[in-house]
Image: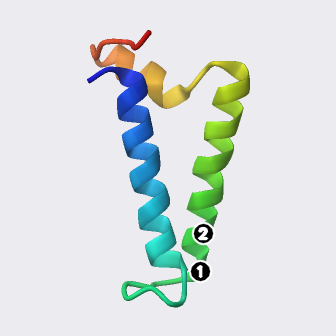
């Protein structure tokens, strides 16, 4: 699995988890403050789409994972 695939898996997992923890109708609702994490991940995905740079992908590459094409 390449770095760009791992970034998408982690981002999707964070979004789903923060929505489950932040939406009042959810069975594992904790606090609506978790929705800030959803916004943060979404903003980072948006900026990486424009700038073609992602901090998490750079960190994963430094750990020795294969960069995607």
The residue lying at 37 percent from left, 84 percent from top is 28
- Asked whether, in this view, residue 41 is left or right of residue 14, the answer is right
Q: Is residue 19 above or below residue 69?
A: below
Q: Which color scheme did the rendering employ for the protein? A: rainbow
Which one is nearer the viewer's eye here, 43 or 33? 43
Quadrant of the frame with the C terminus:
top left
Q: Is residue 55 above or below residue 44?
A: above
The residue lying at 39 percent from left, 44 percent from top is 10
- Asked whether, in this view, residue 57 is left or right of residue 60, the answer is right
Percent from the top left, x then y, of residue 53? 61, 20
Which one is nearer the viewer's eye here, 16 or 35? 16
Percent from the top left, x then y, of residue 39? 65, 57
Quadrant of the frame with the N terminus:
top left
The residue lying at 69 percent from left, 38 percent from top is 46
Q: Quadrant of residue 65?
A: top left
Label 2 sits on a secondary structure element that is: helix
Which one is nearer the viewer's eye here, 35 or 4? 4
Q: Which residue is mark 1?
A: 32
- Which circle marks residue 35 in the picture? 2
Percent from the top left, x then y, of residue 3? 37, 23
């Amino acid at each position: 699995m390449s770095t760009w695939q791992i970034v998408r898996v982690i981002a999707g997992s964070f979004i789903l988890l923060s929505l489950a923890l932040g939406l009042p109708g959810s069975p594992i609702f904790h606090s609506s403050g978790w929705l800030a994490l959803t916004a943060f991940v979404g903003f980072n995905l948006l900026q990486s789409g424009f700038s073609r740079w992602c901090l998490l992908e750079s960190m994963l590459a430094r750990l020795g994972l294969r960069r995607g094409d």
